[in-house]
Amino acid sequence: MTSITELGVAAIRDGVKAGSFSAREAAQAYIGAVEAGRPLNAFVVETPEHALAAADAADADRAAGTLKPLSGVPLGIKDLFCTKGVQTTAGSRILEGYKPVYESTVSGNLFAAGAGMLGKLNMDEFAMGSSNETSAYGNVLSPWRRNDGGNVALTPGGSSGGSASAVAARLAPGVTGTDTGGSIRQPAAFTGITGIKPTYGRCSRWGIVAFASSLDQAGPMARDVRDCAILLEAMAGFDPKDATSLDLPVPNWEAALSSDIRGKRIGIPKEYRIDGVPAEIDAVWEQGIARMRDAGAEIVEVSLPHTKYALPAYYIIAPAEASSNLARYDGVRYGLRVQPEQGGLNDMYEATRAAGFGAEVKRRIMIGTYVLSAGFYDAYFNQAQKVRALIARDFDAVFQDVDLLLTPTAPSAAFGLGEKLADPIAMYLNDVFAVPASLAGLPAISVPAGLDGQGLPLGLQLIGRALDEQSVLNAALAFEERAGFTHRAEAWW
Ligand code: GLN
């Protein structure tokens, strides 16, 4: 029999159901992989007892004929999701030791569907970053290496870097991620896996540590499109505890999966052809366009004229919301408290926040408070909000004519650790193709598309109309079937 860690979400679910192996065997196989994968630093907390308890429940459910949609599937959970009684740090020192007394809606939905938890996944601090280097718990390593024999340590992307690395290295069949401005899609692209950010409001934000509330969305990352559809179906759903949750039924995305995309109109936004992007990315994009045409889609050049303002608008809006959301970490209610020997309450706040937040988080708080300050609110925050509306309007206009958009996911392949850390602007540029869909709240997926000259994965992004995850998944499936991407990182850990 193939090793169970070769099996993804659907295959484990089906194998447990068919009795090919027990849920306990599946959990044990993945617990072993998590242990063996420690050099990658993908997990900050391991919870084998949680995975085994869920597995035993799944085996009992099988005997009783009451299997659930994810019975027997062990998952990794990004450390941004509050997990009851299990340390949740959001990658930050300030939350070290924090054990929530409640479960996030999304992780709770997954567990209610029968899934178990292998552990909590490392991430950029408060999900701010594109390389996982801002984590207070050390960077995650990508399982991938360049083919030049140089063994340079590469980033798995961020902020869901632990999530991406765990899936790519076969430490978990599937994981949760969150995406505020690309944090599911960019790490998926960097590690040769698939990840979808659904329409804003599909997944409840309740119990997800807040970064930028008008942008934050949870979504799955897994080895293929079907596994993402299965996980998203379990994660999504209306939640009265989140005021922005959409009160809509969750479609049966898996059941309706179809790679027949004949007649679909796919737009190619000309503003996504930007200078300085490696030729290999253009080549993979061109090849992707040809594949979609091959699948019977009609390819149309379209224009999203405000695209170039998306990144600057994002890096005003996201820090503004973050500066407000992060005000709650004051040393009183959660995690770290640093009480200076001299001084009162304000000194305690200052000392706690100075010691508890890393450099990137401090930068965002400073930018955020600046753009929200009385003198600059109109010039920056208000202006960015107007730009955001124009970007959403651009999408509305093109979606009158086309069903989907196809673009690169990120402007480069995975880079080496340390290469961009000293230059925040270079780091922010990673998100150039990801943030427009975030600002407009649209569903978007990244699928592995090919390798660059250094043997590293490149991804393509499909963006759909609001609430039309089905078309996004279907087109991604059509692409996946034609791309036949079977490359994977060779185990060195
Ligand atoms: N890299 C982007 C940022 O740093 C996006 C992060 C995210 O989506 N959580 O803000």
Image: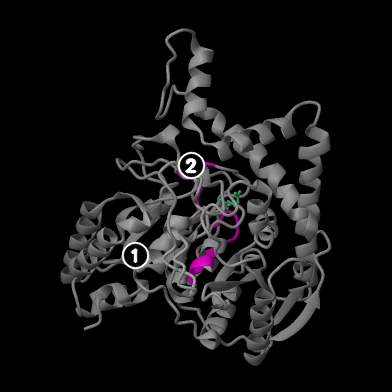
Choose top left, top right, bottom left or bottom right for residue 436.
bottom right
In the image, taking residue 202 as reference, residue 111 lies left or right, namely: left
Which image quarter holds the N terminus?
bottom left
Residue 340: x, y in percent? 44, 14
Would you place residue 481 above or below residue 42 in this image? below
Would you place residue 466 above or below residue 252 in this image? above
Q: Secondary structure at mark 1?
A: loop
Label at residue 443? none
Mark 2 / mark 1, whichever is N-terminal: 1
Label at residue 172? 1
Residue type of the residue flagged with mark 2: Val
Which image quarter holds the C terminus?
bottom left
Range shown magenta:
190-210
SS assignment for the magenta stretch, majority: loop
Crowdedness near tag 1: few (<14), some (14–19) or many (≥20) residues, C-alpha within 10 Å: many
Residue 307: x, y in percent? 78, 60
Residue that mark 2 sits on: 209
> Which residue is depicted at the point 51% across and 76% down?
455
> Which residue is depicted at the point 44% across and 41% down?
136
**Along the line of sight, the residue nearer the viewer: 82 or 127:** 127
In the image, taking residue 253 as reference, residue 279 lies left or right, namely: right
For the question of whether residue 241 can be seen, the reply is: no
Q: Report the mark closest to the observer, 2 or 1.
A: 1
> Which residue is depicted at the point 31% across and 61% down?
37
**Along the line of sight, the residue nearer the viewer: 390 or 491:** 491
